Image: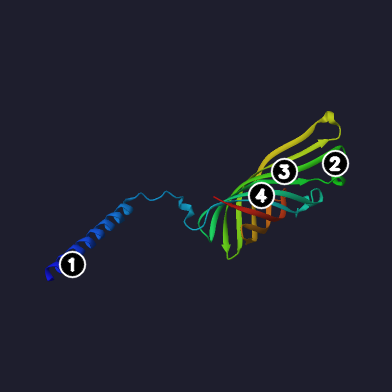
Amino acid sequence: MKIKQIVLLIIGVCCMCTLGVAQGLDLDDEDRQEPKKVNPLHANGLNYVGVGFEIGPTLNRRRFGQPVHFGLPVKVYLGREKKGRFLVRTGIHYFPVPAERRFVGYSHSFTTIVPLAIGYRRNIGDWYLEGSLGAALTTEAAIYKDASLGKSRIAYREINYGVEIGKQIGDFDLGLAVYNTGPIPFHLLCAGFKSSYRIKW
């Protein structure tokens, strides 16, 4: 009986050793697998695109001719840390001239600004602060009441910079932005109350 017990014990030990070796081989195979390719910028928080709507007053002397503006801001955020990200800012800002303030002979007149700027966003809890600097394409346009005159359009490039402060609510940003376009004193300074949605990628 003792011999049989010893034989059974040896068989049991051999089975356990075999299973252990097999598991070790499986782990080695997993270790040898190539790591998945990921965007290194996703390390701490995803990159995202912010698309929104903006409305606000013109702040400098241009307010007498164009008191309000509407904007469709688009921003791309890139970064490895949740506390901050680099950004690229563009979009379009539209400054219409009210009928009572247009020059005689105009049926419609307006200014558009299309910026292209780079900057940085700093997150402080649920709040954020942004600053950016770049250039903008400014277009002054007017449509005459006399159709035979067509329309007038002048476009030029200017410096553009701005700051923004706001609060993050889920995937939305609610903020206040101030932008300046052009050299002082021939500039256009405006503020905008903004709401935007963050699309992760």
User: In percent of the image, x 85 and y 38: which residue is there?
Assistant: 107
Q: What residue type is labelled 4?
A: Pro
The location of residue 49, given as percent across then percent down, is 59, 50
Which of marks 2 and 4 precedes in the sequence? Answer: 4
Q: Which of marks 3 and 4 is in front?
A: 4
Do the CB atoms of the residues marked 3 and 2 lie less than 8 Å apart? no
SS assignment at label 3 = strand
The residue carrying mark 2 is 103
Taking the image as shown, residue 79 lies to the left or right of residue 105, namely left
Mark 4, residues whose alpha carbon is within 10 Å: few (<14), some, or many (≥20)? many
Q: Nearer the viewer, mark 1 or mark 3?
A: 1
Q: Is residue 198 above or below residue 139?
A: below
User: In percent of the image, x 30 and y 54: which residue is there?
Assistant: 26
User: In percent of the image, x 42 and y 48: which residue is there?
Assistant: 37
The location of residue 153, given as percent across then percent down, is 75, 36
State how far apart marks 4 and 2 are (Cα): 29 Å
Q: Which of 116 and 7 is in front in this view?
A: 7
Mark 2, residues whose alpha carbon is within 10 Å: few (<14), some, or many (≥20)? some
Which of marks 3 and 1 precedes in the sequence? Answer: 1
The residue carrying mark 1 is 9
Taking the image as shown, residue 104 lies to the left or right of residue 49, namely right
Q: Which amino acid does label 2 sit on?
A: Phe
User: In percent of the image, x 73 and y 46: which residue is there?
Assistant: 94
State how far apart marks 2 and 1 are (Cα): 105 Å
Do the CB atoms of the residues marked 4 and 1 lie less than 8 Å apart? no
Which of marks 2 and 3 precedes in the sequence? Answer: 2
Q: What residue type is labelled 3?
A: Thr
